[in-house]
Image (cartoon, rainbow, N blue to C red):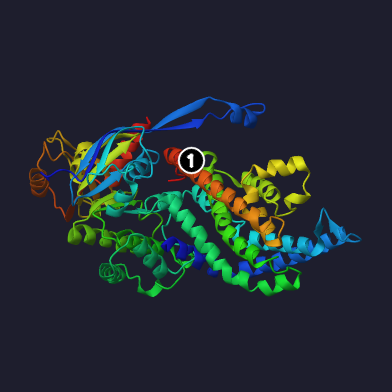
Amino acid sequence: MACGVAQAKTVFAYRFDYVTSLLGLLFQLYVLRAVWSSIYRGHDSVSGVNLSTMVTYATLASFQNWLLNPWQFSLIPDRVREGRVAVDLVRPVGFVTQVVVAQVGRTAATLPFGLLLVPALAILGARTPVSATAGFEYALSLVPAYAIITLLSVVVGMVSFWTIELNGMIVIYWMISQFLSGTMVPLWFMPSLLRDFAKILPFQAFSYTPNAIYVGQIGAADAIGAIAIQLVWVALLYVLCVLIWRRAIRRVVIQGG
Amino acid sequence: MGSEPIICVESLVKEFRRTKQQSGRFSAIRTLLTRERTVSRAVDGISFGIPEGELVGYLGPNGAGKSTTIKILTGILMPTSGTVHVAGIVPWRERKRNAAQIGVVFGQRTQLWWDLPLSDSLELVGRLYEIPPPRFRFNLKLFTELLELGPFLSTPVRQLSLGQRMRGDLAAAMLHSPRILFLDEPTIGLDVVAKERIRSFIYELNKEQGTTVILTTHDLDDVERLCQRVLLITDGSVLFEGDVESLKNMHTRERDLIIRLPPGSESIELANFASARIVDESGDLTRVRFNPQSLPITELVSFLLSKYAIVDFSVKEPELEEVVRNIYAARSL
């Protein structure tokens, strides 16, 4: 708990940073809308999806990505590279718990900045969910989505126990996960082979699933199945996380002094 | 002593494996692909026991394996082989339980939150360790007083001076009243005043609260001031274990007697003492080196007083610094 509070406070210590990234996000959303509008020029719908649905999806996916999937990643790679993991490991709380709680704390602190943005989302063209049920299912699916994001960041972050330096890998991971999660281009626009590939990976479960539910591309009935798949991913990633951690702790090498 | 030692270390070994760096053409790629490993033994069969309430200096040159041992004792590294018990707990198996009974200060890194005020950090530590509020308040007040934290409690840690940060770290490490305190170079890079403040705090803790302290340092003043016992390791094994006095005696038995003669007097002759010799004569100061075991100092002094008009004299104890320098130097030969 305390770690979460600490991380949240750290966010506030750097509020200028967050406000700046907020402006960056607004700009990104504006450009996204312009791009999709120009693609749709002269068409009422593409693959059965109209412009307003598309803009809603793109706006929401980017916003959600900004809020829940921090670019700073999990704390693990930094802590390992600087050797500060030593300090974390002598605390009476498990290391993974500390990392997860810190991430939740950071998200919680980012939330107020995000809420400031909701009116802007509406202005930029995001619509309300297609139905009340979809809205409810969307909110429900955000919970496993966040769990998947967090678990993935822990799993990938723990690789740094083996490699020490992870920055290059994080950039690649980031780009791949952004694409395969459907944040940049929704899965329904992908070629079928790529779509099938994306579907067997966990990434789509944190971005495509909730947003497609929101805009009705995953129907209210199918949504239950999609959320179940999310939950399966949460369970699988959790097990993976525990397994990797057991091996990582034996590998611990503390940098410096 | 008599009772079970609070820290037991037996035949501790820690090996590090790293991929061998290849040289020559495509060295980076070949390093990446090679299965060749080099194994280095940072700790090579160390055994020792520390009784509760003792303040022990853990010394050794850079790379001797001090920090590695501390990391194993605090549970953040797993040894390759050997057994360790810290107050009955195997540190790396029950890391959380071990954490509750030890305090750790790594001089080179901080456990405080960089961006938060010191008081916030301390409060967070209090919550992490689930310290009961009355004890938290009591300790915070005590440490604020002893370490004079008051003036910078509300300053973000990144803005603290090194000395202030170290005092903050010490307070954070002791807030949950651990039985054992590990200090890994707590005075590194500090000025004389800051060092002194930290030393007196450590001294107080050990004396008043009976905290067992394991101190690694390169500052031998720390050791002379604080430590009842010294463990000296080089190359991963114990070279010496005992009190500071016997460490000095073991390696330098001789003492220097410095004599001041009135200006213009004749120089001293020591012909009839086999174990004493003049090592330096400059101006009116003469330095006589002798072995107090074969030649009692009283005998030497009374002889000199009877023959020469001595203005002043003093006996110089060997300095730990010099002793340790000799030991380290001997090692590298």
- On the image, the x and y values in percent for residue A178 come to 68, 51
Nearer-the-camera pick, A175 or A130: A130
- On the image, the x and y values in percent for residue A135 come to 64, 65
Q: How many marks?
A: 1
Q: Which residue is mark 1?
A: A244
Amino acid at the residue labelled 1: Ile
Figure quadrant of residue A65: bottom right
- On the image, the x and y values in percent for residue B208 come to 18, 62
Q: Is residue A228 left or right of residue B250?
A: right
Reply above or below: A94 against B61. below
Question: The residue marked by circle 1 belongs to what chain?
Answer: A
Nearer-the-camera pick, B12 or B305: B12
Nearer-the-camera pick, B137 or A153: A153
Reply above or below: A182 against A54. above
Q: Residue at x 30, y 69 (%)?
A: B140
Q: Is residue B158 left or right of residue A193?
A: left
Nearer-the-camera pick, B173 or B26: B173
Q: Secondary structure at mark 1?
A: helix
